[in-house]
Image (cartoon, rainbow, N blue to C red):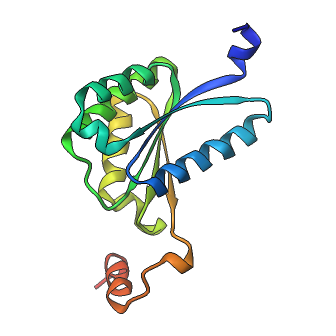
């Protein structure tokens, strides 16, 4: 590999919890690649959260790959609390991205943008980035209107945290 190729590529580690969130994380990578330059190549390493949780050797392998990554994207449901083994793995990965002067991006779904900083996953991932000494960014991926649960119970539940009463 020549030096020109090396300067025009970057490693990205994606950790996701569902097929939909993995797809959204890949779309984010595509947007980043388009904005950097059309000839810029992002080398993706994609890991399913559940596999990292139950298979420690995979978690260690992901952490080793993170040492080359300039970007760690964690695409998860914002309302869910991350299990302890996953938090440990993400700590290792975030520390690994520090080697490459990288960043952690929390791509959250299943929440409203206005509730972002209150959700458990956001708080956890921001803390992981802080402890690892890497930059932290977040993005909320709201569901399209046709996929929103519009039942009265769901509307009431989404509105609860936003009222002053």
Q: Is residue 143 left or right of residue 149?
A: right
Question: Residue 157 falls in which quadrant of the image?
Answer: bottom left
The furthest residue to the bottom: 152
**With 99 as the anchor, is 157 left or right in this view?**
left
**Quadrant for the N terminus in the image:** top right
Q: Nearer the viewer, residue 51 or 89?
A: 51
Residue 61, x across and y down, in percent: 35, 23
Which quarter of the rendering shows the C terminus? bottom left
Q: Examine the image and state in which quarter residue 149 appears.
A: bottom left
Look at 31% across and 88% down and name the residue there: 153
Residue closest to the eye, 123 or 21: 21
Residue at 39 percent across and 19 percent down: it is 64
Residue 104 screen position, x and y as percent: 46, 37
Residue at (26% x, 48% y) in the render? 82
| Residue farthest to the right, as pictured | 38
Give residue 27's position: percent from left, percent from top. Answer: 61, 49
Please determine whether, in this image, residue 161 is positioned above or below residue 53.
below
Locate residue 114, reporting x and y percent.
45, 68
Residue 90 higher or lower than 11, as above or below: below
């Amino acid at each position: 590999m020549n030096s020109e190729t090396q300067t025009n590529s970057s490693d990205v580690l994606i950790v996701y919890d569902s097929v939909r969130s993995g797809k959204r994380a890949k779309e984010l990578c595509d947007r980043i690649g388009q904005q950097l330059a059309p000839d810029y190549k992002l080398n993706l390493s994609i890991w399913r959260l559940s596999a990292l949780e139950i298979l420690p050797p995979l978690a260690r392998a992901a952490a080793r790959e993170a040492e080359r990554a300039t970007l760690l994207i964690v695409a998860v449901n914002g309302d869910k609390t991350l299990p302890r083994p996953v938090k440990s793995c993400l700590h290792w990965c975030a520390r690994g991205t520090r080697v490459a002067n990288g960043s952690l991006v929390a791509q959250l779904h299943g929440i409203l943008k206005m509730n972002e900083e209150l959700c458990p996953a956001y708080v956890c991932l921001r803390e992981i980035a802080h402890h690892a000494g890497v930059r932290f960014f977040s993005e909320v991926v709201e569901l399209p209107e046709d996929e929103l649960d519009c039942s009265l119970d769901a509307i009431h539940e989404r509105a609860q945290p936003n009222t002053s009463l």
